Structure formats: structure tokens, C-alpha cells
Amino acid sequence: MKNVKGFVFDAYGTLFDVYAVTALCEQLFPGKGPALAQLWRVKQLQYAMMRSLMGRYRDFWQLTEDGLVYACQSLGLELTGDRRARLLEAYLTLAAFPDVRPGLEALRKRGVRLAILSNGEPKMLEAAAHSAGIAGLLDRVISVEEVKIFKPSPRVYGLAPERLGLGSAELGFVSSNSWDVAGAASSGLRALWIQRSVAEPPEELGFGAERVVHAITDLPPLLGS
Amino acid sequence: MKNVKGFVFDAYGTLFDVYAVTALCEQLFPGKGPALAQLWRVKQLQYAMMRSLMGRYRDFWQLTEDGLVYACQSLGLELTGDRRARLLEAYLTLAAFPDVRPGLEALRKRGVRLAILSNGEPKMLEAAAHSAGIAGLLDRVISVEEVKIFKPSPRVYGLAPERLGLGSAELGFVSSNSWDVAGAASSGLRALWIQRSVAEPPEELGFGAERVVHAITDLPPLLGS
């Protein structure tokens, strides 16, 4: 990783802790919070991939709402207008994991360029970056909105070298999702898997991580001295 | 549906009952059968969509194996060579749901053209069609292998009118998967959702079924007299 001049990060689950969303699910639907949060997340991702393949792009804010509607119907939960608004707004006020700010600050001190590359819609990402207190540490917040197709399309990962003005081999891409790591590696980025929770096996997609880390603060030492 | 001249069917879960796969999972891993079968199916589908988006096609037989490997690792189950072979081979000897043969026979008597359109690899599909005793009732078995991208890409659904020599509006596409119905409808086919199990809500993908049926034998009456 010694010639890496920029790091690009996935957003939700990598930099931003979505635990607050699960907590609000539980508050609004006692006993059903984890099931709702899990199915919602599954559908959000599934719809992103299905619509990409169908050639029917719809931005991630809308897909997030679509996934919520499906998840509530499937679980037999009544999604009132007020609950819908509160659950969606939870995505705008996320916190960063505790290692994120110190990790990004240390990387900046090393002169490394930093960016987000996410399925998220631009306003969602900007709101979360401000809420999490890391907006000032990022050179760019890159959304798939620019290409209107979702990860793991190579058109998405190709935005990173383009927007940061660096070569693919100079860019480390960091995600908590093994499939996102595979997509980035398949596109020629140097992919790192950040394992934040219980160890899951890597996805069987033919492309793996160059490194596995457990916190953003694990990254600066990889750059060498 | 009165001007429909052909019906095209999804394969697994629509014509072929994959219950035997679940039963074998349970026989080989007592107490873990349903969890393994469910995660295996999720990964099989996820890998098909991810690889399509990545531009890294790999045939469905191989993806079925990849999904099995992941599912066993994730659940901590030991996948010996013998177990792997037996589980994969279960896909080659599936039965048809009981309504399939009488339904297809009645449609053929009406002069309707019949085909499978599936993510499956050609040899898998041929083997299952023979095993289920419906090979002789089908005019075509169409696999995504011809376009090397998976559903719900419109390139897949476009194979149906092309190979059957019929217009999109003359073709009914039948699937037990609501997302597959949405993909077909988005591509201009006349889509029917066959609800085989407990009622699930339709996927929030912006395209729905023209009709909902519960068995293949529900189709002939839709053609009118």
C-alpha cells in the first residue's frame, strides 16, 4: 500500500454507523426492530442491483423508501406517514464509527486524498457527512448519481480515479461489504475489507481484498514511513 | 390475455419444485436444512446479479456451487466433496409441481407455444425438464447463457420474442418471483405472477403483474374460448 495516494470509502456501515436506524425501528415497532432493519437493508441493496440491471435507475433516497415500504408490508407493520418520515430522516443524522474521525485525520496529515464513493444520493451523503462531523476531512463526496447505475458496476468504481485525478493503483478502496470489495478489485482499485462486526466469510465472487483491516485507524500504518 | 400465443416460464420455483434440495440439505445437515437452503438460494441469486453488474459472467451451475460454498462457510457447515456433489446433483433431478404437466398439456391443446426462460445453465435446465417429465411439452428451453447476463436484464427477456418468433404483446411470461415479473413487465412482456406459497407483497420495483395466478392450470381459461 506504499504508493497509495488516496483512500475512497464506502459510506453506510463503513464510515457511518447505521445502528441509530435499527434503534429507531425498535422504538417505533417494539420487538420487530432488528427484523425490520435487516429486511429493509436487504431490499435497499436488492432494489439497487435489480434496477441497475433493468436499466430503471431511481435514486437511493427513493429506493430506501421503496425498501421500507416492502419491508413493512412483508412484516405486517403499519407504516404511517409520520413513521415513514422519521425512519427515512434517520439516514440524514447518522454518527460515524468512533475510529473514523481519528483515522481520517491521521491520513490527511500524511497528505492522502480522501473521498466517499457510495450508492447514496448526494444530499443524503452530504447530510450524513455533516452530521457525523467528517465533512471537512473529505476532498470529495462521490455519488453513483453521476452515472445513474449502482455498485458493483465498474462505471461506479471508475468515478474514483477520475474525480480524484489519481491512477487506480494509487487508490485504496475501503468497504465493510465483501461484495463491494470484490466489485472494486474487479475494477482495478486496490481493495481493502474493513471487518466491523462478527467475521463473515468473504463472498465467492472471484475477487478479494488486498488487505483486511478492522478500523480506519489501521490504515495510516499501511502507508509506510 | 386473449391474443397471447405463447407462454414463457421461469424454471426454479415456478415449474420445478426445489423442495427436494431443501430436504437433502436437512438430510446431510440435520437441523440446518432450511437455513442452508435459504441462504444458498439468496447467494445464488445475489451472485447472479452482482456478476452481471460487474461484467463478470459465470454460468449458473458454477454460481450455484459458489453460493453453496459461501452458505456452508457462513453457517459453519463442513462441505465435503461428496456432500457438494450430492447437493449440486439435486438440481438435475427436480420434480415439477403437480399442476405443471396438466397445465402445459392443456395449453398445448390450445396451440400455444411454450418455453422456459431461465437463469439456469442449459444442461441443468435440460436435465431438470427431463427429470420432471415435461421436456416433450416445451418448444424451447432458453437459457441466459445465450446473452451471458442474468435476469432482470432486458437482454434476457428479449430472448423470448426472438426465439419464439412472436411479438412481446403475444407472449405471457410467468414467474413465482415478483422481481422477475417486474423485469419482464419492464421489458414489454405480458407478465403473470404465480403465487405458489404464502402471499408475499409484490416487490416495489415500479412494474407489476398483469395477472396473478396460483397454478399453471389457471392459465388456459385466461385465453378465452
Image (cartoon, coloured by chain):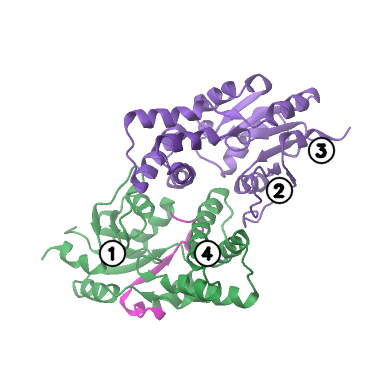
Chain colours: A green, B purple
Q: Which residue is drawn at 32% across and 59% down?
A: A198
Q: Which of marks 1 and 4 is in front?
A: 4
Query: In the image, which is nearer the foreground, mark 1 or mark 2?
Result: 2
Query: Horizontal and vertical percent for residue A141?
Result: 39, 70
Asked whether, in this view, residue B150 is left or right of residue B215, the answer is: left
Which residue is label 2 attached to?
Answer: B209
Percent x, y for residue B123? 50, 24
Chain letter behind tag 4: A
Marker disc for residue A7 = 1
* Residue at mark 4: A36
Q: Which residue is drawn at 50% across and 26% down?
A: B92
In front of the other: label 4 or label 2?
Answer: 4
Image: B73 above or below A51: above
In the displayed structure, A121 sits above or below A186; it is below
Q: Which residue lies furthest to the top in this view?
A: B136
Q: Are marks 1 and 3 on the same chain?
A: no
x and y, in percent, of residue B210 in the image: 75, 47
Q: Which amino acid, by three-letter code, is at mark 3?
A: Leu
Specify whether disc 4 shares its chain with disc 2.
no
- Residue at the image point whose x is 58% and y is 21% from the top: B130
* Residue of label 3: B222
